[in-house]
């Protein structure tokens, strides 16, 4: 692999990590501000609680569809869950 390709891949991997961590931070803040439990969120998006815990523990990133479901639960646009991430 070329050095340029390796550097590009490292930057992409770092960006993905930052996106996941930013999303988790935003979701945690929303849940805290609205006094919303993992169980409540799991019920309202139709996923089990272990799925929510895996998201919050940075084990998985939700699909676009689940991201939309989460946003709907909180009455916000999907972009609000990802806000400020473009500045990373």
Image (cartoon, helix red, strand yellow):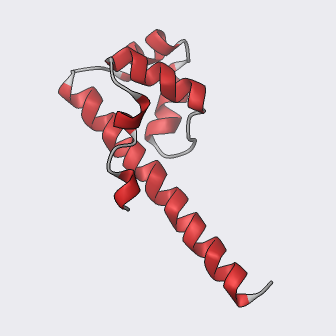
In the image, 52 versus 22, the foreground residue is 22
Single out the residue that lies furthest toward the bottom.
Answer: 3
Q: Closer to the camera, 42 or 64?
A: 64
* Residue occupying the far right of the picture: 1
- Which residue occupies 60% across, 74% down? 10
Q: Position of residue 5 (x, y in %)?
A: 71, 80
Residue located at (38% from left, 50% from top): 22
Which quarter of the figure is the C terminus placed in? bottom left
Q: Is residue 36 above or below residue 85?
A: above
| Front-lying residue, 63 or 43 | 63
Query: Could you say which quadrant of the image residue 3 lies in?
Result: bottom right
Left or right relative to 60: residue 41: left
The part of the image, by quadrant, that contains residue 63 is top right
* Residue 54 drawn at (x, y percent): 52, 36
Quadrant location, the N terminus: bottom right
Q: How many marks?
A: 0
Tell me: residue 57, above or below residue 5: above
Residue at x-position 56% and y-position 17%: 47
- Position of residue 70 relative to residue 6, above or below, is above
Residue 32: horizontal and vertical position, in percent?
Answer: 23, 30
Q: Is residue 54 left or right of residue 78?
A: right
């Amino acid at each position: 692999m070329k050095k340029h390709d390796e550097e590009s891949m490292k930057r992409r991997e770092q960006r993905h990590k930052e996106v996941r961590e930013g999303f988790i931070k935003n979701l945690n803040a929303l849940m805290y501000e609205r006094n919303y439990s993992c169980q409540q969120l799991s019920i309202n998006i139709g996923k089990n609680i272990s799925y929510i815990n895996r998201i919050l523990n940075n084990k998985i990133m939700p699909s676009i569809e689940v991201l939309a479901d989460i946003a709907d639960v909180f009455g916000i646009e999907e972009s609000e869950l990802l806000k400020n991430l473009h500045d990373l």
